[in-house]
Image (tube, rainbow, N blue to C red):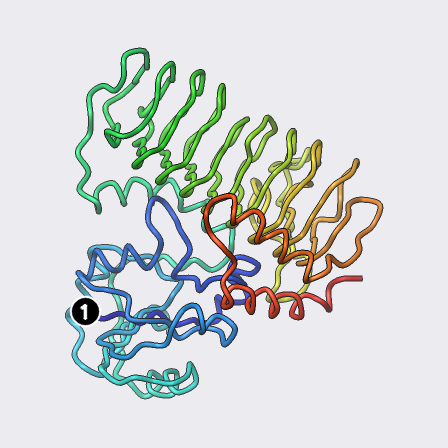
């Protein structure tokens, strides 16, 4: 099965995270959305029909059997419904297309949409989960960790190391993990530690929890459930119900909850993000789709941060703060709840972060991990710089 993931209206609703990746490349639980579909459909990603500025990095397909909406989470039942589709049929939920079975290659989203509009619709009988806003990522994360453990057919271990305390029986730990003097509690959900993960002494972790390849949990960290630490991340302090994408750092004390942190971010020592208002009312947050601060319908919402953004030491962030791509935040007091991409400053005001300088910072950080900013990634930053310019003052 050769799968092409197509963007729908979720692209703007999932910004700033989808400025730098299609929704199918979002990690929720252990796996990315695309990886879940690949496993459930026994297929491979053939390409993406995504935004123009992402197309150079996330290529257009050369062959295809199936089109799947980028922001839909896979399940065994849903995958079976899709496999039962005939050529030219689409699977829908309340008018929204989940998948379209076709061997035809479409050069643009407009061409695909035109074909899907005339396709025979089959109504899904599954409980379909759409990732329609950044908050859905952390809200679904714990359940997806549990599902991914089953999807990956992982075998639990009864013990690990000499001086660790393991409570419960849902531990999925790669033999290469480095860990001593740690407390793990899987009573409320599984704990997954991937290849070459290091959990330093004194850390206390509750499941559901996942740490991907080469991730590090720092000394005496307190990690609550429904949290995923992406590959090559370093995380310390107190963290709850948060998803870190790859190569992001929160290496020091400070609280972070109900949040999503993009790739190549760095949170300075004692950065704290509020996730609950003192009056327990619903949290409002910046919505890129409406270009306004809107109600989220949630009591708990912390920080949504796009790729390459950073905070200085002792940074305080208000409930429901949204930070774009390649922003740099520092100083005392609370900065605004919405900080556009390529902003540099804090509560006293912001200036535009020079694009060339921002790319140089990205290159320096990436080279520390043996990687470099590719031409495709550089052009994506060019696009984001212009796209968010209307929000910078």
- Give the residue displayed 32% in from the left and 15% down from the top: 164
Judged from the image, the secondary structure of the residue bearing numbered disc 1 is: loop
Q: How many marks?
A: 1
| Rendered location of residue 96, percent (x, y) | 38, 72
Q: Is residue 369 above or below residue 354?
A: above
Nearest the eye: 42 or 150: 42
Which residue occupies the extreme right position in the image? 348
Nearest the eye: 153 or 99: 153
Q: Is residue 109 left or right of residue 296?
A: left
Q: Is residue 119 left or right of residue 342?
A: left
| Rendered location of residue 168, percent (x, y) | 27, 21
Question: In the rendered image, which quarter is residue 358 located in?
Answer: bottom right
The image quadrant where one finds the C terminus is bottom right
The image quadrant where one finds the N terminus is bottom left
Q: Is residue 84 left or right of residue 366?
A: left
Question: In the rendered image, which quarter is residue 79 located in?
Answer: bottom left
| Rendered location of residue 254, percent (x, y) | 61, 28
- Give the residue displayed 62% in from the left and 36% down from the top: 276
Q: Is residue 364 above or below residue 170?
A: below
Q: Is residue 59 above or below residue 19?
A: below
Q: Is residue 156 left or right of residue 257?
A: left
Nearest the eye: 252 or 338: 252
> Dot 1 corresponds to which residue?
1
Question: In the rendered image, which quarter is residue 289 located in?
Answer: bottom right
Label 1: few (<14), some (14–19) or many (≥20) C-alpha neighbours in 10 Å: some
- Give the residue displayed 28% in from the left and 55% down from the top: 36
């Amino acid at each position: 099965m050769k799968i092409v993931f197509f963007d729908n209206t979720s692209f703007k609703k999932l910004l700033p995270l989808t400025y730098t990746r299609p929704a199918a490349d979002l990690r929720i639980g252990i796996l990315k959305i695309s990886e879940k579909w690949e496993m459930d459909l026994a297929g491979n990603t053939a390409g993406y029909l995504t935004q123009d500025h992402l197309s150079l990095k996330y290529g257009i397909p050369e062959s295809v059997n199936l089109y799947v909406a980028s922001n839909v989470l896979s399940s065994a039942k849903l995958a079976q419904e899709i496999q039962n589709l005939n050529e030219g049929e689409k699977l829908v939920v309340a008018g929204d297309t989940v998948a379209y079975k076709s061997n035809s290659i479409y050069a643009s989203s407009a061409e695909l949409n035109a074909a899907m509009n005339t396709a025979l619709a089959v109504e899904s009988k599954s409980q379909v989960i759409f990732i329609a806003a950044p908050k859905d990522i952390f809200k679904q994360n714990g359940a997806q960790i549990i599902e991914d453990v089953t999807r990956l057919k992982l075998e639990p271990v009864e013990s690990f190391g000499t001086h660790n305390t393991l409570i419960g029986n849902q531990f999925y730990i790669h033999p290469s993990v480095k860990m001593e003097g740690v407390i793990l509690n899987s009573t409320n959900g599984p704990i997954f530690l991937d290849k070459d993960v290091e959990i330093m002494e004194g850390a206390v972790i509750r499941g559901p929890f996942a740490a991907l390849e080469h991730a590090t949990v720092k000394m005496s960290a307190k990690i609550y459930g429904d949290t995923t630490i992406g590959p090559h991340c370093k995380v310390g302090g107190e963290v709850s119900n948060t998803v870190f994408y790859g190569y992001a750092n929160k290496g020091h004390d400070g609280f972070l909850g109900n949040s999503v942190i993009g790739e190549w971010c760095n949170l300075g020592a004692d950065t704290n993000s509020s996730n609950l208002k003192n009056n327990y009312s619903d949290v409002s947050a910046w919505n890129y789709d409406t270009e306004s601060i809107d109600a989220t319908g949630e009591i708990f919402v912390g920080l949504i941060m796009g790729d390459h953004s950073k905070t200085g030491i002792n940074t305080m962030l208000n409930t429901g703060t949204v930070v774009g791509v390649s922003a740099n935040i520092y100083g005392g007091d609370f900065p605004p709840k919405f900080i556009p991409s390529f902003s540099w400053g804090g509560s006293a005001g912001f200036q535009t972060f020079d694009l060339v300088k921002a790319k140089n910072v990205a290159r320096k950080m990436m080279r520390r991990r043996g990687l470099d900013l590719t031409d495709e990634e550089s052009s994506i930053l060019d696009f984001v710089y212009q796209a968010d310019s209307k929000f910078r003052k």
